Structures are given as C-alpha cells and as structure tokens.
Amino acid sequence: MDILSFFTGGLPAWSLLVICPLLFVAGFVDAIGGGGGLISLPAYLLCGLDPHLVIGTNKLSSSLGTAVATAKYARTGYMVWWLCGLSAITALAGSTLGSHLSLVASPSFLTVFMLVALPVIGFYVLFKRDLGVGDPAGGMTYSRRRTALLSMAIALVVGVYDGFYGPGTGTFLMLLLTGVAKIDVFKAAGVTKAINLTTNVTALTVFLANGTVLVGLGLAGGAFNIAGNYLGARMFSRKGASIVRPIVLVVIVVFAIRLVLQLAGIA
C-alpha cells in the first residue's frame, strides 16, 4: 500500500479535498460550542464510505481535535478537575454501551438514522437559544454533591448517544450542564471537553478493536480537525459560531440530498 492509499483509505484522491477542509471547519465549530460532527460525518459520507467506517473513522479524527481543545481549555483554567473526573467515569460507561450498539446496527439502519437525525439535530443546534450561564459569579448554583450527581447522569446519557452516533454531543453537554446542573458557562465548557474527550476515546477504542476505523484517513482528517479546534478554542465566542453557521447549513443540505439519492439507488 502506497502512502496516498493509506491516507485516503482506498477512496479517490479527490476525497481528501472534500474531507480535510470540512474537518478543519468541524474542529472550529466543535471547539466553540460543539456540533462539529454535523460537518465531519457528512464529509466522510459524501465520499462514499460505509456508515460503520464513517462513524469509526470520524471518532479518530474528532478524538485528536478534542484532545487539543481540552488541553487549551485546561490551560485557561476552565476545568473543574474533581467534577471532570467523576463525570468521565459515567461517560466511559455510556460511550462503551453506545459504541457497541452502533456496531450491531445494520448499515441501512445507520443510513436512515443519519438521514433523519442529522438534519433535525443540526437545525436544533444551529438555532438554539444562547446558553445559560449558571452562577454569574463563576461558581455553581447547587451543592457539590448535587452538581456531581447531575453531571454524572448527564455524562452517562450523552455518552451513550456519542458512542452510538455523536453529532451535537458538545452542544447537548453544554446545554444540560448549564441548564440542568447549573454550572457557569466557562466551567461547563471545560467539563464538556473532559466528558467529550472521554466518550470519543472510549468509542474509538471499541471501533479500533472491531476494525471499523480507517486509520490513515482518520489521521489526515484529524490533522485538520486539530487545526480547527485550536483556532476555535482561541475564538470562544458567539461571533465565531456565526461565521460557520451558513457552512453547516450547506453541508447538511448537500448531505441529505446525497443520502436520499443513495437510498434511491441513484448515487
């Protein structure tokens, strides 16, 4: 196998011209408020990959990008380490369950699921109201125990979703951690990254063990995802999110058309 074939995963060389730029944008979106999977999954699917390989390969690239963003948030002091650690435990359990459920799902089921779920999740994420801010003083509204229990429950449930599918995970975590657990938005961002990194790495481990990851393609996309995550983490603002909103909408529409044609046997 030559180097080009390794990094394309057997896809045509032009596929990298589609995947890599979109993975950069996906990383940018994900670092700001989550939802990078709304772009990265369609990027792989548009190039003709099997749904199982799409989900597995996407976990590799997104794990790399999330790791960089998590490190960036840690350096800025957003990580509540005791809460991150407790939430990571249930996130691991949830993601393990979700990823195994994804493996046993048929390719046709995953295709139909993506066709229905991705546009719905995408439009919800893109047009959601602003995040709550919890305690404006920068703390937590509830006691440590209640905050921990709520955060662990959130991590478990969202972990199952992320292991099975994934797009919008970061946004859902932010909404739930700020709205339900009442954590201020900056600390919630840090906890979100810790949970999301845990669910990504856990699912990736399961998918690697079952041979549903194109490592070269995932690394190529991951390099661009890292760059996007780094830039997005430096521009943690609503302005940054508004820049990529039109791009996300276009990608979702093209993706939906592509899947409809595929199901109809035309593409």
Image (cartoon, grey):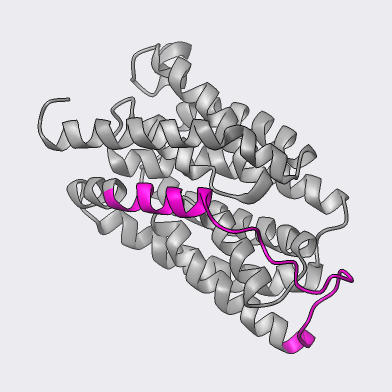
Q: In this view of the protein, can residue 162 be seen by the observer?
A: yes
For the N terminus, the quadrant is: top left
Q: Is residue 4 left or right of residue 253?
A: right
Residue at image location 55% in from the left, 61% down from the top: 172
Q: Position of residue 102 (x, y in %)?
A: 33, 56
* Residue occupying the far left of the picture: 265
Is residue 13 on the magenta stretch? Answer: no
Magenta stretch in the rendered image = 116-145
Q: Residue at x 17, y 31 (%)?
A: 261
- Quarter of the rendering occupied by the C terminus: top left
Percent of width and height locating residue 12:
34, 14
Q: In the displayed structure, would residue 55 be above or below residue 139?
A: above
Q: Determine the residue positioned at 59% across, 50% down.
A: 34
Residue 205 in sight here: no
- Where residue 66 appears, as percent x and y from the top left, is 64, 45
Residue nearest the observer in this picture, 203 or 108:
108
Would you say 143 lies left or right of 156 here? right
Quarter of the image where one finds residue 29: top right
Q: Residue at x 79, y 73 (%)?
A: 82
160 or 248, which lies in front? 248
In the displayed structure, would residue 223 be above or below residue 193? above
Looking at the picture, tell me which residue is in the foreground, 171 or 84.
Answer: 171
Query: Image quarter for residue 21?
Result: top right
Q: Up-down: is 154 above or below 255?
A: below
Viewer-closest of 215 and 107: 107
